[in-house]
Image: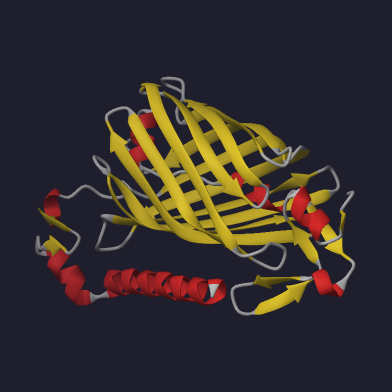
Amino acid sequence: MRVVALGSFLKNAVTLCAMLCGMAASPVFAADATDGGMNMTDPTPFAQQKPAVDGLNFKASAVTGVIGGYANHMFIASVATPMPFINTFGAQLDLGIGNYREDYTSAAAGLHLFWRDPDTGLLGIYGDWGYVNPEHAGRMGVEASLYNDRWTLDVFAGVQFGQHVMTEFVDEVDLSYYFSDNLRGSVGHRLISRGHVANIGFEYMPEGSGGWSVFGEAEAGQDEYHSAWLGLRYSFGQSGANTLIERDRVADPIVRIPRNLASVTRCGTIADPANYYTSWNGFETMKHDHLCADKDELDRRGADEDKK
């Protein structure tokens, strides 16, 4: 039943994506926009609506720290753009590549498709993929943000799936406060394959830095999970944002890399076929012998934990 429900969820998400792309390409919709018509999601005249992304914008980050108790160093790049003709919708692509536990590769990708009003919030669909050699897993679901003065609430809720994890619910929740226009602090919650995790984070963009900022996160939770990383970020492009709070609300949404690697940081090989688990890789369900989960689940299935 979980697989059927998940398949229906993903089918609906893909259908929504196709509808957005179709609207972007539609000459009828484009004509409505250029003639000062109405956006279907907002009764405000099109010319008065604020764009989801205020131009073609880029971010490049270098991150160093630990994930799941092991060293991880990554380079992360993002590009965000408004949708053609329907600029209250936007898209962002995130890519990451790095080194995990010295001898292994870590990699990740994420895609956001969203509606946003910079004065109110954001609503969209989100999917990502995380790889820690050789384990990997995906996530797909809904993300939303709510803006209220200096407060921001960011939520992602969906399912994780893939060859090396069990199909199950995951989430990310972040409550942020901007102590100044260029300093943000946050507290949050994660649900990963290893259990519940608490998170704190920050980002600081010095005034006049020209787009440079420093950021970091630290988290700890069930199954002896702990992670912490520090990064340097450079934001550039067509955005007219001069402060961190402006950039976060008009330029590019939250980047969920490297935090999406958390679910594949404790893994093991199951010896007894009777204890194999069923996973869904996006196309079919299969039985597998290599599982990433918490210690109790690995022990229950008699898995020999990886000692990389």
Front-most of residues 39 and 30: 39
Q: Quadrant of the N terminus?
A: bottom right
Q: Give above or below for 210 relative to 20.
A: above
Q: Is residue 126 left or right of residue 42?
A: right
Give the image location of residue 293, x and y in percent. 72, 54
Q: Is residue 248 left or right of residue 220?
A: left
Residue at 21% in and 47% down: 50
Residue at 78% in and 49% down: 295
Give the image location of residue 128, x and y in percent. 56, 58
> Which residue is at the far front?
300
Q: Give above or below for 61 relative to 159.
A: above
Q: Is residue 44 left or right of residue 109?
A: left
Front-most of residues 131 and 200: 200
> Which residue is at the far bottom?
284
The answer to whether residue 79 is visible is: yes
The answer to whether residue 133 is visible is: no
Residue at 47% in and 54% down: 157
- Residue 90 quadrant: bottom left
How is the protein colored in the picture?
Answer: secondary structure
Front-most of residues 273 and 9: 273
Front-most of residues 112 and 266: 266
Give the image location of residue 77, x and y in percent. 56, 47
